[in-house]
Structure formats: C-alpha cells, structure tokens
Image (cartoon, rainbow, N blue to C red):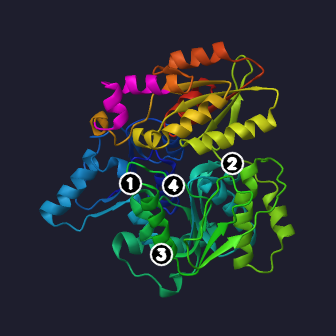
Amino acid sequence: MHIVIVWAWGSWISNLAHIIWDLWYKNLIAIDSQESQITTALKEKWIPVKIGHWKYDIKDDDIVIYSEATKDSPEVQSAFNLKKEHHLPLKIWNYFEFLWELSKYFRTIWIAGTNGKSSSTSLAIVAWKECIPELWLWIVWALVPDLWNKSYYLKEEAKDEFHQLFDYIFTGKRLPYELVKKYYFFLEACEYKRHFLHLDLEYLLITNLELDHTDYYKDWEDYRSAFLQINQNTKKLTFVLENKGNTVETDYSWFKDIKTLPIRHFELDHVRWKHTDCNASLIAWLLQELNPSLSIESIEKIFKPFRWVWRRLEYLSTLENWAKVFSDYGHIASSLEIWYKTLKEHFPDKKIFCVFQPHQMRRVLAWWDEFQKVIPEFDKAIIYSIYAAREPLELFKEEPLFLEHKFNSVREVWEFFAQGVWAEYYEDFNELSKRILELTDKDSIVAVFTAWDLDYQIRKLLKLC
C-alpha cells in the first residue's frame, strides 16, 4: 500500500507530503508533471518523487490525495476506475476533502479573503508557537523563512498522537477519544468551488474580499454568498477588520455574528508595508480572544522579528546590472496596485518595472478595466505568456471582446491586452530576461507578478535554485 500525492507542485498539497513523511509514513509517493522548487524540497527530504504521469500504476490498496487541477490525470482516473469497477475500499480524497477530514478532529481556525491570507497565516503561526501551546498543526500556501522555509508546522511533542489520528483516517484503526478536538489546526484554505464549506470551523478570520476565481463564481453576489455560508457554518466567531485603513475597502454589514476589529500600527523589524498592520491587527485580536492574558505590547514583541513570506513581494536578488528583483503571487488588479504604491513609497527615486504573468483568462476579463488603469502606473510593463489553467480558448468565443476583435489565438488576445496597458508581450523566457536587462539598470526595481512557473524561472536565472 502506498500513499500517493498527485500534483506536489502546489506548496499547499506538498505540505501533506511533508507532514505524512514526518509522521513516519515511508510508503509515500509524490507525483508531479514538472520540476520546481517544491519538488526539489521533497527530494532533498528523500521523499520519492516521480516527475511525469504514467510512471506509477495505482494499486487497489493505495490511498490517493490529489489536487483538483489533476482530477483528469491518469493516476487519479485510474484510482476512481478501480474503486468503481471492483468496489474496492481504495480511499481517494482531493486536497480539500482531506482537510475536511482533519478538521473534524481539531479545533479549526481558518484565514479567508482575497488578499493577505498567506502573510496573515504565516504571522499567526510564528506568534502562536510562542503563546498558544495547544497549537498542533498549521498549513499555509507559501514558504516561511521563520519556519526554516517550510509552509507547515507540526508540533513535535504531539507527533505520536498525530500519527494515531492519521492511522484512524487512513485505516480505521482505533482513535482515543481524548485526542478529538484536543489541539488547534490553523490553516489558509481556498474558497474555490466552495471547498471551504466542508471545514469544521470554530473561528473564521477574513482579511478582505474582492471577486476572484471567476472561472467558477458568476459574479460578486455569487462570491459573497460563499462567504455568507462559511460565516453561518462557523461555530464561534468571525473576525473582520474595519474599513478605515484597510488596503481593500469591504462592506461587512451583510454578515451576522461578526466581530469588527480596529486596525492599529505594529512595528516589525523586517516588514514595513501598509497591509502589515491589517494582517497583524487581525491576528493580534484573535490571540487575545484565545488568551486574554496577552497584552498588545507582548504580542507586538512576538511579531517584531517576523521576516517575510515566500512570493509575497519577496526580495530575491539583483540582476547583473544591479536592478533589484521582487517576486509576488499577485494575479488580480488590486494586488498590483497595492504593491506598486508600496514600492513607490519605499523607493521614491527608483523606476518601478512590472512583469505580469496573467493567471486565467476569465480572471483578467473580469478585471479588464482595472488592469487597464493599474498597469500603466508602472514606469514600464511587460506581459508574459498566460497561465490559463482549466480554460481552453474555445470557452471564450462568445465573449463580447472576442466577438469584436475576432481573436484566433491566445497570443492575439495577450498582444491586444499588452497594447491596452502600454506594455510589451513575450512568450519566450530567454527573450523576456534579455529584454528586462535592456530596460533596467541600478536605479530600477523589477516586480514580477506570477501565480505559476515564471517565479521558478526567475529564481533559476538569479541562481537561487
């Protein structure tokens, strides 16, 4: 029997591979379609990784945990076919279904929202290790330097108990009742396809809300309804920030049973962005809710040495011409706007360059006008070949923009988009990197916005991986 993790490229699902390995399950296999910084980290831990599909045949006693993006992969389809045709007890979960299983046995706290989830969750775990001893498990969608560049935390002293819990989920072995709801489970989850509605939540924290995942949600009302549902499902409290001072204005009057929190200023040694006060305020109030003996001053002292989060306006290095390079996961217009203003504030005498890899056609169409306003604010912009997951071009043939311009290829769409935001368009990374060097110098800041593979290519260019 093997535990098979399909699509380990995602930092969120690779966490499960690390956690399962740390709990002494050595019958683990991770499968991905390509090499990345994430798969390298798995290999360095001696976790078996197979790059490419069709390299492992699913057995009838395997356990399969997969990303939604790989539902049509041969491994996942094979697992479903075996279970259907032979009525096997083979266990198959997508990533969110497995989180649901875990949340049944923990006091689960979830950070939600469009922006700031990873940064807030990371700040929370660094603080919680110091002041909430019942914290057992934590998962975030980014690597955290303060946690040895991991994106998960597992309480070492509780590993024996945690192994019992996983054995119960995997095999049905007896689980001592006293372990149920003994520890906290703190995670950054995702609202895509309303997956978060499965979670068994005690507390919900919301950073801010804007329409996202437009390949699933029809409009703002549809998106909002998902958060209304999760708010209603939360057993204790939902925390939100007041609009004054927040980086994205959000009206929460349509929520019930929420606690609206003021935003205060926090002095951190390494991070000084405007949104940091929002993230820190949200976490500080929750810490006080769970441990009333904590003062704001003591919490700020714990926050103070916090560094940064992987791919959240992370400073990478300099190019050979000494231009500074930052990388960010941003893929909606407001993210680009927030980071442009932040960089301009901190580097007023520098030219700010934007390299943007769009993430999904539907998302860009939904925010088309906003992108048209934000991207030209940068001193220079380059658009890189889109990551259009789950979106064949045929889906958009009836879109007004497509009908008007009679696009016949993805390239035509993005050349048109680039022209509208006064940017250049590239599909080849070597050409892109050469052009960046031509446009920049020691007085330049290059902000790379990508939700996909461009970050990994930039890191290899800078010899960081």
Q: Position of residue 24 (x, y in %)?
A: 49, 61
Q: Which residue is depicted at the point 77% across and 80% down?
A: 292
Q: Residues within 10 Å of mark 2 (few under 14, many from 20)?
A: some
In the rendered structure, which disc, 3 or 4, sits on the residue that comes first in sequence? Answer: 4
Q: Residues within 10 Å of mark 4 (few under 14, many from 20)?
A: many
- Residue picked out by circle 2: 145
Q: Which residue is depicted at the point 42% across and 54% down?
A: 219
In the rendered structure, which disc, 3 or 1, sits on the residue that comes first in sequence? Answer: 3
Label annotation for residue 15: 4
Q: How far apart are the alpha carbons under marks 3 and 4?
A: 20 Å
Task: Between label 3 and label 4, give the one nearer the viewer.
Answer: 3
In the rendered structure, which disc, 2 or 3, sits on the residue that comes first in sequence? Answer: 2
Q: How far apart are the alpha carbons under marks 2 and 1?
A: 37 Å
- Residue picked out by circle 3: 200
- The region drawn magenta spans 398-417
Instruction: Assign a secondary structure to mark 1.
Output: loop
Q: Residues within 10 Å of mark 1 (few under 14, many from 20)?
A: few
Asked if residue 361 can be seen in this view, the reply is yes
Q: Which residue is depicted at the point 64% across and 44% down?
A: 312
Q: Position of residue 86 (x, y in %)?
A: 13, 63
In the rendered structure, which disc, 4 or 1, sits on the residue that comes first in sequence? Answer: 4
Q: Position of residue 135 (x, y in %)?
A: 63, 71
